[in-house]
């Protein structure tokens, strides 16, 4: 897989901090004026860096890990809108009238908080634990799915007539042994051939049943081949702290406030559990459909052994391959999300500051401040493919082994009959 990297800017100007002022003589409307003043311009460039997987659609379709590494940061800012009003009483210096000052707009701002840096080992461990639990549950749940019951019945359809054929071979050898016990040497070949035909015509329905069961299994291979389910586990750690004494200074005025910062780190593991047959043998229809009535064995062969081995080895491989299934984790990934929210609280004015900056006036007649909350939210994200140790599980559909074939026992029985005939 070819991986490339690029930077993706997605958020530039955060806010334009500004306010409007009215500085006028009280009761003299002709001197009222609103002047736009830019106080603070706060810029921020946020970005995402990470790998690009051009084959992600194919990877998802084939249940491969399409996760790429990613680092990103995003900022969101909500401005504070406030109103500040001051009235001053004239003093004895000069001919100065009482004055009123008003400011309206974004009177305060919050600085960008740093990414949370507190230890989050507890959240990481808890997320892993939840992931293990979810994965183990999914692994074991595959045993009870509908496909397991359907597959069991299909394999039984294949095994039962095949097992009947295997027993029939023993019956055939016993019949040959019994018939040739006192027969003349010249009639042995005919006895073997006649016995074979008598038995093989009785086996024809069984051969057809095996062939039909093999076809049914092949038709369902896509359904029985594998199954998948998504699993995940996540946990969170949180912290908060407060900073006092923040301030914004304007012409002859100052606003104080405190900041409250809330931090949260979330760890999430996710992936996909797969269930599959490790040995996906397909029924060989050429062998399953062989017509043994067209094969007449010689007296020496007694059984056309090459076809016998091909036939039952094929059936045995199919049953053994599909009766065993295993579940395991196909792929996994890790996501860490860090969120820091900084907000302004406890907004307050500064009477002392205002009086100190108006020496020409006798006193401060009135001062009022109303201010909404300013909030800056920073989100950092880190994503990466991750190897998470996990439990695996395998199971077997009972009664589908290949011991019943027992070719060595059949070979011993055949040799015994040979020795009797050619003693």
Image: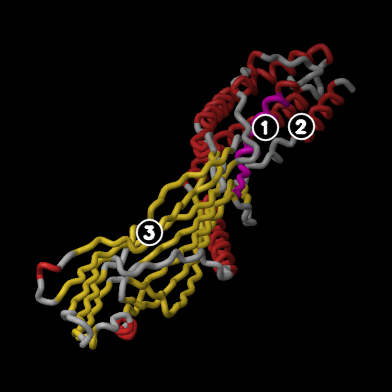
Q: Earlier in the sequence, mark 3 or mark 2?
A: 3
Q: Which residues are magenta?
A: 308-329
Lower position in the chain sequence, tag 1 or tag 2: 1
Q: Position of residue 366 (x, y in %)?
A: 20, 84
Spatial CA span between label 1 and label 2: 9 Å
Label 3 CA crowd tier, 10 Å (few <14, some 14–19, many 20+): few
Residue at 60%, 46% (x, y): give it: 397
Nearer the observer: mark 3 or 2; the answer is 3
Residue that carries the numbered disc 2 in the rendered image:
410
Task: Say whether marks 1 and 2 touch (CB < 8 Å).
Answer: yes
Identify the element where label 2 is drawn.
Answer: helix
* Residue position for label 3: 41
The residue lying at 52 percent from left, 54 percent from top is 270
Above or below, comparing residue 342 to residue 279 in the picture: below
In the depicted view, which residue is nearer to us: 24 or 224? 24
Instruction: Mark 1 or mark 3: name the one nearer the start of the chain.
Output: 3
Give the percent coordinates (x, y) of residue 349.
30, 80
């Amino acid at each position: 897989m070819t991986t490339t990297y690029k930077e993706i800017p997605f958020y530039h100007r955060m806010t334009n901090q500004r306010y409007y002022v009215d500085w006028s003589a009280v009761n003299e409307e002709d001197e009222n004026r609103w002047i736009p003043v830019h106080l603070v311009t706060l810029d921020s460039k946020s970005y995402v860096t990470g790998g690009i997987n051009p084959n992600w659609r194919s990877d998802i379709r084939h249940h491969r890990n399409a996760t790429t590494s990613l680092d990103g940061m995003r900022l969101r800012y909500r401005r504070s809108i406030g109103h500040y009003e001051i009235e001053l009483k004239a003093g004895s210096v000069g001919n100065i009238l009482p004055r009123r000052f008003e400011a309206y707009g974004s009177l305060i701002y919050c600085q960008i908080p740093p990414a949370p840096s507190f230890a989050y080992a507890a959240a990481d461990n808890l997320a892993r634990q939840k992931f293990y639990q979810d994965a183990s549950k999914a692994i074991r749940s595959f045993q009870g799915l509908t496909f397991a019951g359907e597959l069991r019945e299909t394999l039984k359809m294949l095994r039962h007539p095949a097992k009947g054929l295997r027993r029939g071979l023993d019956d055939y050898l016993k019949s040959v042994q019994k018939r040739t016990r006192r027969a003349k040497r010249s009639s042995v070949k005919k006895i073997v051939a006649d016995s074979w035909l008598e038995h093989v015509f009785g086996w024809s329905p069984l051969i057809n049943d095996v062939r039909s069961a093999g076809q049914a299994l092949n038709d369902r291979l896509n359904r029985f081949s594998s199954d998948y389910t998504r699993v995940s586990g996540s946990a969170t750690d949180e912290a908060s702290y407060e900073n006092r004494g923040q301030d914004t200074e304007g012409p002859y005025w100052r606003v104080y406030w405190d900041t409250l910062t809330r931090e949260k780190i979330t760890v999430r593991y996710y992936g996909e559990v797969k269930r599959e047959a490790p040995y996906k043998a397909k029924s060989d229809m050429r062998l399953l459909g062989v017509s043994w009535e067209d094969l007449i064995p010689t007296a020496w062969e007694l059984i056309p052994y090459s076809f016998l081995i091909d036939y039952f080895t094929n059936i045995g491989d199919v049953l053994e391959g599909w009766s065993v299934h295993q579940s395991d984790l196909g792929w996994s990934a890790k996501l860490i999300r860090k969120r820091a929210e900084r907000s302004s609280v406890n907004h307050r004015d500064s009477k002392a500051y205002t009086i100190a900056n108006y020496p020409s006036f006798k006193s401060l007649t009135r001062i009022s401040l109303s201010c909404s909350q300013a909030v800056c939210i920073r989100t950092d994200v880190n994503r990466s493919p991750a190897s998470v140790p996990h439990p695996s599980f395998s199971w077997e559909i009972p009664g589908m082994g290949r011991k019943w074939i027992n070719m060595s026992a059949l070979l011993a029985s055949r040799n015994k009959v040979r020795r009797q005939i050619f003693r």
